[in-house]
């Protein structure tokens, strides 16, 4: 946990060269890259009491290799480069990570064309894959079932919360600062700076970077960056396998994903602590930070439901959404989805697990923004869409964002 630093604002406006809003992996990686670039004083604001409290700290912990993303897209490029950078960073900083590999399993003939397309994308993106049959699949994952699969040896797992704490240390070592419990409320651009009003007082910076995740569109609006997209939160619910169930999964077992959606379907993930996650599904969250069904944020929910883009998305994919809700409400239905991959999993083996929320940018016509998105304004840069694999790609995203800022500042 990052200790709180108290500053008196009674008589002055605090100064910074670059202000970074958001203490997740992307924000901290950007701040670290900025301190390395020598832009002056870099200050990170995080509204929570510690860093990595939302997407970064609640994801599956997978180091993605980049097999799913359109060749030439920002996701494909930053994931491939960022994964290598993340592995090197973890090695240097003593953060737990492992290249354990994963299998993507086609359980019926209808999924084989999609599996072939994933293999082609992987090869176009420079990712090692091997098409394997049932015998090789059983060698890798004895309890998995499928007609054919892809073996992706370079996929891994990592402690992303540990990565964030290491980034905080690096930022401090380079003369920067990370301040928690500090929220950006308003901002205005002057002739030579941006004045940001926070709950702890005003801060004047030469440039502002917003890496606000679940609040990305709101941060952009505060900074005067006009974008038609809105963040729609999707809650991912996980179960854990009990002690007996753990023996059924060695590493990572994934289904062939539906190409219409950025979600990868319910899968099995071994975490670095040895636990096995099952999930996630993808249901509309009852608030941007409403991690349980019993704690809705009505203002957030009404904002989502009133957004024309969400209404068009919901109408277009009604049957898919109903299926996700069914799996959310029924552990038996959730287990049935998992049994496609590992038939011996039972509903009784599933224990309550953590929940996460994916910040997904949706356009006014109801389309899901598939690639990462970075918007710019006068003296500011906003990372508007950075869901998975952003944690894997964060060091490379941070390098790109830092380069945009230094170019604007003339550094």
Image (cartoon, rainbow, N blue to C red):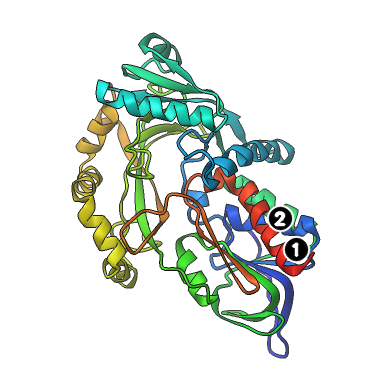
Quarter of the image containing the C terminus? bottom right
- Is residue 329 positioned above or below 130 on the image? below
Q: Residue furthest bottom?
A: 11
- Is residue 325 positioned above or below 404 on the image? above
| Secondary-structure class at tag 2 | helix
- Is residue 12 positioned above or below 96 on the image? below
| Secondary-structure class at tag 1 | loop
Asked if one can make out residue 27 in the rendered structure from this viewpoint, the answer is yes
Horizontal side, residue 131 vs residue 286: left or right = right
Give the camera-side residue of 404 and 253.
404
Quarter of the image containing the N terminus? bottom right
Residue name at image x 73 percent, y 59 percent: 34
Question: Which residue was labeled with disc 1?
Answer: 176
Give the camera-side residue of 369 and 248.
369
Disc 1 + disc 2, Cβ < 8 Å? yes
Give x and y (percent) for residue 175: 79, 62
Asked if one can make out residue 45 in the rendered structure from this viewpoint, the answer is no
Give x and y (percent) for residue 144: 35, 19
Horizontal side, residue 402 vs residue 284: left or right = right
Residue name at image x 32 percent, y 23 percent: 112
Question: Which residue was labeled with disc 2?
Answer: 32
The label number, if any, that marks residue 361 in the structure image:
none
Which of the 4 image quarters holds residue 28? bottom right
Distance from Cα at disc 1 to Cα at disc 2: 8 Å
Give x and y (percent) for residue 379: 65, 73
Give the camera-side residue of 272 and 114.
114
How many numbered marks are there?
2
Which of the 4 image quarters holds residue 229? bottom left
**Which badge, 1 or 2, is on the more N-terminal residue?**
2
Q: Can you tell which of label 1 and label 2 is closer to the viewer?
A: 2
């Amino acid at each position: 946990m990052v200790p709180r630093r108290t500053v008196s604002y009674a008589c002055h406006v605090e100064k910074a060269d670059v202000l970074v809003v958001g203490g997740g992996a992307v924000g901290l990686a950007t701040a670290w890259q900025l301190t390395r670039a020598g832009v002056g004083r870099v200050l990170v604001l995080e509204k929570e009491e510690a860093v990595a409290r939302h997407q970064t700290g609640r994801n599956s912990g997978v180091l993605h290799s980049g097999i799913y993303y359109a060749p030439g897209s920002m996701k494909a490029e930053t994931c491939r480069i960022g994964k290598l950078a993340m592995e090197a960073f973890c090695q240097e900083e003593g953060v737990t990570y492992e290249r354990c590999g994963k299998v993507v399993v086609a359980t019926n003939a209808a999924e084989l064309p999609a599996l072939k397309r994933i293999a082609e994308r992987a090869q176009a993106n420079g990712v090692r894959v091997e098409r394997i049959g049932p015998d090789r699949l059983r060698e890798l994952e004895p309890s998995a079932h499928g007609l054919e699969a892809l073996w992706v040896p370079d996929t891994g797992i990592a402690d992303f919360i540990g990565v964030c704490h290491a980034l905080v240390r690096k930022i401090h070592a380079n003369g920067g600062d990370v301040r928690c419990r500090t929220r950006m409320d308003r901002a205005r651009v002057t002739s030579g700076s941006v004045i940001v009003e926070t709950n702890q007082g005003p801060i004047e910076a030469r440039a502002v970077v917003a890496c606000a995740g679940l609040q990305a569109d709101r941060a952009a609006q505060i900074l005067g960056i006009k974008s038609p997209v809105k963040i729609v939160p999707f809650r991912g619910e996980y179960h854990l396998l009990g002690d007996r169930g753990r023996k059924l999964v060695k590493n990572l077992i994934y289904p062939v994903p539906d190409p219409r959606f950025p979600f990868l379907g319910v899968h099995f993930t071994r975490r670095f602590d040895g636990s096995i996650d099952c999930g996630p599904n993808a249901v509309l969250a009852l608030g941007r930070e409403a991690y349980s069904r019993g704690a809705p944020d009505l203002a957030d929910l009404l904002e989502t439901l009133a957004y024309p883009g969400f209404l068009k998305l919901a109408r277009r994919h009604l049957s898919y959404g109903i299926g996700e809700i069914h799996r959310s409400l029924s552990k038996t239905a959730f287990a049935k989805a998992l049994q496609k991959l590992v038939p011996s999993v039972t509903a009784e083996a599933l224990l309550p697990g953590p929940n996460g929320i994916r910040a997904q940018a949706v356009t006014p016509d109801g389309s899901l923004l598939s690639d990462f998105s970075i918007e710019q304004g006068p003296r500011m840069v906003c990372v508007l869409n950075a869901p998975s694999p952003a944690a894997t790609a964060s060091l490379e995203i941070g390098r790109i964002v830092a380069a945009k800022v230094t170019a604007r500042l003339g550094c």
